[in-house]
Image: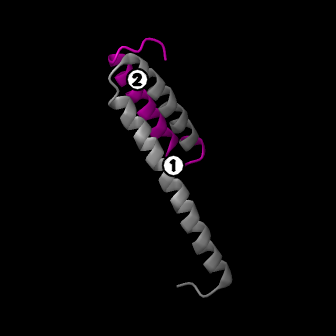
């Protein structure tokens, strides 16, 4: 348990940041899952665009590494093309 006032504040802020990041990461994982599990080309296209946007935002805010975001976008684009999505 921290004794110094600034350490107590850092503990509070880090806990709040952890909860925020956990929620964002969960939403990101759900979006990726929805692309992979989509049945039709229309749902795959809309899910892909949503996931792509979330990945770009997460990478720009350093929630995930930018290279990981690029890799996931590439993999999801491939999945979407296999489901019949023409233009991404």
Q: In which quarter of the image is residue 47?
A: top left
Question: What element does badge 2 sit on?
Answer: helix
Q: Is the magenta stretch mostly helix, strand or loop?
A: helix
Q: Name the colouring of the figure.
A: one colour
Give the x, y percent position of residue 63.
53, 49
Q: Quadrant of residue 44?
A: top left
Contact (CB < 8 A) between labels 2 and 1?
Answer: no
Q: Is residue 5 above or below residue 81?
A: below
On residue 51, which mark appears? none
**Tag 1: Cα neighbours inside 10 Å, few (<14), some, or many (≥20)?**
some
Question: Which residue position is annotated with label 2?
Answer: 44
- Give the residue at x 49% y 17%: 88
Question: Which residue position is annotated with label 1?
Answer: 24
**In whole angstroms, how far apart are the C-alphas of marks 2 and 1?**
21 Å
Q: Quadrant of residue 10?
A: bottom right
Q: In this view, does 32 lie above or below 12?
A: above
Q: Is residue 37 left or right of residue 10?
A: left
Q: Is residue 33 left or right of residue 17?
A: left
Give the x, y percent position of residue 67.
48, 38
**Tag 2: Cα neighbours inside 10 Å, few (<14), some, or many (≥20)?**
many
Which of the marked residues, 2 or 1, is nearer the chain's N terminus? 1
- Magenta segment includes 55: no
Give the x, y percent position of residue 20.
55, 56
- Give the residue at x 36% y 14%: 84
Name, please, the residue furthest toward the right.
6
Tell how many labels. Answer: 2
Along the line of sight, the residue nearer the viewer: 53 or 34: 34
Q: In this view, does 41 lie to the left or right of 25?
A: left
**Over which residues does the magenta segment extend?**
59-88
Question: What element does badge 1 sit on?
Answer: helix
Q: In this view, does 73 lie above or below 17?
A: above
């Amino acid at each position: 348990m921290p004794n110094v006032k600034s350490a107590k504040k850092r503990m509070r802020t880090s806990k709040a940041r952890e909860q925020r990041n956990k929620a964002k990461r969960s939403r990101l994982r759900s979006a990726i899952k929805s692309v992979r599990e989509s049945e039709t080309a229309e749902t795959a296209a809309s899910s892909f665009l949503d996931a792509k946007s979330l990945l770009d935002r997460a990478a720009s805010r350093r929630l995930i590494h930018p290279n990981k975001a690029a890799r996931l976008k590439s993999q999801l684009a491939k999945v979407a093309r296999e489901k019949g999505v023409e233009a991404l």
